[in-house]
Amino acid sequence: MIDRNFIKLYEESFKENWELPALTDYNTAETLTYGEMAAKIARLHILFRLCQLRRGDKISVVGRNNSNWVISYMAVVTYGAIIVPILQDFNSNDISHIIRHSESSMLFVSDHIWENLDIDALPGLRAVVSLNDFSCYYQRGGESVVAYLNGMDDLFTKNYPTGFTRDDIKYAELSNDKIIEINYTSGTTGYSKGVMLTGNNLAGNVLFGMKTNLHYKGSKALSFLPLAHAYGCAFDMLTTLAVGAHITLLGKLPSPKVLLKAFAEVKPNLIVCVPLIFEKIYRKQVLPQLSETPLRWAVTLPVLNTRIYEKIKKKLIDALGGRFEQVIIGGAPLNPEVENFFRKIKFPFTVGYGMTECAPLISYSPWEEFIPRSSGQILKGIMDVKIESEDPYLIPGEICVKGENVMRGYYKNDKATAEVIDSEGWLHTGDMGIIDKDKNIFIKGRYKNMILGPSGQNIYPEEIESKLNNMPFVNESIVVEKDGKLVALVYPDFEAADKCGISSCELEEAMEEIRVNLNKEVAPYENIAKIYIYPTEFEKTPKRSIKRYLYANFSPI
């Protein structure tokens, strides 16, 4: 059990950092100090008490990242109820299902999502509150939430007649073994499961972030990953608020253009992102520079390439705000070509590994110690790892982990829990990989995606896709088995093709040439028999992983 209490981390932090800036909404530039945030949390605690909410009641929150999202989350957990964060990218039917399945009695929601929800399909809700201004959208018959919220100023004054001070911050007495959060996965298998996370699971992640100095008092974070996802929640919100850091909430779609402007303005001390964003910056910011003839020639000369790489590195660091100590990439594997280039220019980045079921962190190494192509080292003193293989150093097997961060189980789903957590407490991740003697983890692919080759070889389509995605005119791809052969579905880079004046017929010819070149880079049993052009972007989870199951039985027209 983690020695420090999860809820008390925030009671202590909010008191200690009372006057420091805590939350800024990027769109409005409005900032709340830790004291002002604590006062808004106290107002919601008054509402919860008047509604007679109890320990164990569930409260959902779904919407864009903003200050009120953070305040709602922190108010629920510090009150002692159970928070149910829902990804806003889920469709309205999935959101309604999660609210019902979790048995949530209250919902905090953004306007644009509330408009698409059918309240008649949510009979368990007692009230729905706006994340825009904390007004009440809906209350069940017999409830008085509207009256409580309309009279909150008077209620607040009555509760704190001499004003709300840091000494008034007193949060729930709740041991770390209690469920704090139910986080519904955004998996690629077509349905979500409610991951039950305890105070111990969350504290394991937060304290690791504190001990490794990911954030510290006065440091700055730009929050653009969804806070409803375990990755963004742990390191853009929970760790930052535990140490007195300052979070700026982007609150809009993180396109490269929007992000680069925000980075330049906020100048974060740590950047937490997913590979898709990092790879887009590489393709949009770096490759165009390298494709210019003088540079393409210059980098082949040892006397010049070091100087050129230094310039590219400086440009990138300046574009990302110029003050960050490292970029942490997680949520999915990083493309090897992109990783190799950023290592070549000595850019300060590292790749971590985790999953919602571990709240989320499993492995991490600071960028100076990061081993190429790994996903970092298993968290020392917090987690342990084993590979289900006769030779875990050379032969890939399923990655299994055990430790403080492993979830309690899936909510109301004992069968699914038993399928992933065995009798000895090992969580079977579903990822295939190997480790080295220092317990650095090297992921090969998902167990369920593995294809058995004609002579019994294990084929990991993700490894082939990473090579294919580096080819000209390829935006993204999926490798599947069809009639005993490997074929690839490619969503082309139509923009690049148009710029080069390539017609539809010529694009087909280009794909055949790409197939031939790809087969030179992979093992014979990994050869692709045919590339099919897919006309639209592949459907993805909110975490931006392709929903592979939708394309398993692909048939060309």
Image (cartoon, rainbow, N blue to C red):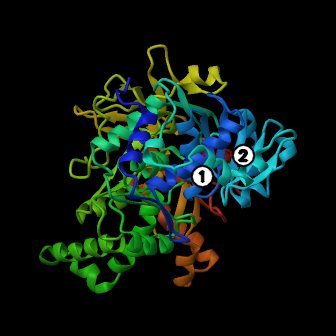
Q: Amino acid at mark 2?
A: Ile
How many marks do you count on the picture?
2
Residue 435 location, x and y as percent? 30, 34
Query: How dense is the environment of label 1, judged by Cα within 10 Å: few (below 14), some, or many (20 and up)?
Result: some
Say whether residue 239 is left or right of residue 356. left
Residue at image mark 1: 542
User: Image quadrant of residue 53?
Assistant: top right
Residue 47 location, x and y as percent? 67, 43
> Could one spot residue 146 in this view of the protein?
yes
Residue at the spot x=40%, y=27% of the render?
404
Q: Amino acid at mark 1?
A: Pro
Q: Nearer the viewer, mark 1 or mark 2?
A: 2
Say whether residue 240 is left or right of residue 555. left
Dot placed on the residue nearer the N-terminal end, 1 or 2: 2
Residue 390 location, x and y as percent? 34, 22
Q: Find the residue positioned furthest to the left.
A: 303
Residue at the spot x=32%, y=28% of the render?
392
In this view of the protein, which residue sits in the foreground, 443 or 362? 362
> Could one spot residue 479 in this view of the protein?
no
Q: Residue 95 has which mark?
A: 2
Split into 4 quadrants, where in the image is the N terminus?
top left
Say whether residue 103 is left or right of residue 120. left
Say whether residue 315 is left or right of residue 114. left
Split into 4 quadrants, where in the image is the C terminus?
bottom right
Residue at the spot x=52%, y=49% of the render?
162
Query: How dense is the environment of label 2, judged by Cα within 10 Å: few (below 14), some, or many (20 and up)?
Result: many
Helix, strand or loop status at disc 1: loop
Q: Find the residue positioned furthest to the front.
A: 162
